[in-house]
Image: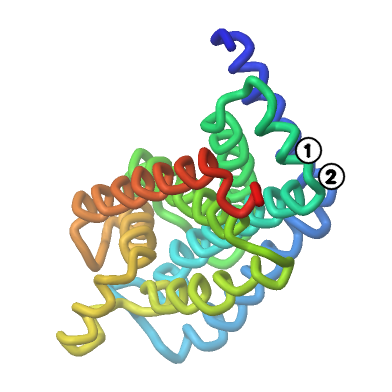
Amino acid sequence: MNNRELAIALYTIVRREIRRFTRIWLQTLLPPAITMSLYFVIFGNLIGSRIGQMGGFSYMEFIVPGLIMMSVITNSYSNVVASFYSAKFQRNVEEMLVSPMPNWVILVGYVLGGVSRGVMVGFLVTMLSLFFTDLQVHSLTIIIIVTLLTSILFAIGGFINAMLANSFDDISIVPTFILTPLTYLGGVFYSISLLPEFWQGVSQLNPILYMVSTFRYGILGASDINIYLALVVIVVFVVGLFMVALDMLNKGKGIRS
């Protein structure tokens, strides 16, 4: 395939993915926004007023970046895992695999679809947060970079989960037992500086901590960890998972009998 044909193939997959989740926006875009609004009300206003400041900021200001990032992570992941597993279950993916289209185009197309939904929901949550607090912008560049890298990372993770899943129940195992605990323990609701030294070290093994802390730095200018180290860690995870996902796709893992 020449470059024009590759671009058309990639555009077709991305457009289909975006149309898929925007067509059912009442199920894909509205629920995350409502859920995050409840977090703002319950944790930010009701509980936050009793907690006081966290890291030199009001509790609402502190948790908003984490909640935005949590919505980006969840939706980037869930969009790809649901979409690709459905294609695998309905045997649609086999048609793509036997076409002249390279496998990396399939992977990138699904990933960009997940990124689109993650970024869109993140934007909606950001707009809603303005009703509860005044957001700062310390570094727009950092905000954009970490948002895109995080969306890409978890979209690839969703792709891998979909390839390994053998049933619709399997696609909920990772989000329930791995993704959700790591997110809640990733510094969304607290600063790891409050933890004993040992648990601070344990927390630094959680990759989501690096994403939340870096995004918080982009908004508030404060972070629990070195942001440059965090960006390196995120990039390493993105490259590593991309290579794993592409290798699995080339081998037909979970697709070919």
Q: Residue furthest left?
A: 197
Query: In the image, 237: left or right of 43?
Result: left
Which of 246/203 is in front? 246
- Let me know if residue 14 appears in the view: no
Badge 2 vs badge 1, beta-carbon distance below 8 Å:
yes
Q: Residue at x 68, y 29 (%)?
A: 98
Image disc number at residue 198: none
Which residue is labeled 2 in the image? 23
Residue type highlighted by circle 2: Arg
Which of 44/142 is in front? 142
Compared with residue 68, is residue 218 higher up or lower down, i.e. above or below? above
For the residues labelled 2 and 1, the Cα–Cα distance comes to 6 Å
Compared with residue 35, is residue 126 higher up or lower down, i.e. above or below? above
Q: Position of residue 34 (x, y in %)?
A: 71, 67
Which of 170/56 is in front? 170
Which residue is labeled 1 in the image? 19
Q: Quadrant of the N terminus?
A: top right
Query: In the image, 144: left or right of 80?
Result: left
* Picture quadrant where residue 46 is located: bottom right
Q: Position of residue 114 (x, y in %)?
A: 61, 46
- Let me know if residue 169 appears in the view: yes
Q: Residue at x 35, y 43 (%)?
A: 239
Q: Position of residue 9 (x, y in %)?
A: 66, 22
Badge 1 marks a residue whose secondary structure is: helix
Crowding near the residue tagged with mark 2, few <14, some 14–19, many ≥20 C-alpha atoms within 10 Å: few
Q: Residue at x 34, y 52 (%)?
A: 237
Q: Residue at x 66, y 17 (%)?
A: 8
Residue type highlighted by circle 1: Arg
Which of 216/147 is in front? 147
Q: Position of residue 209 (x, y in %)?
A: 34, 67
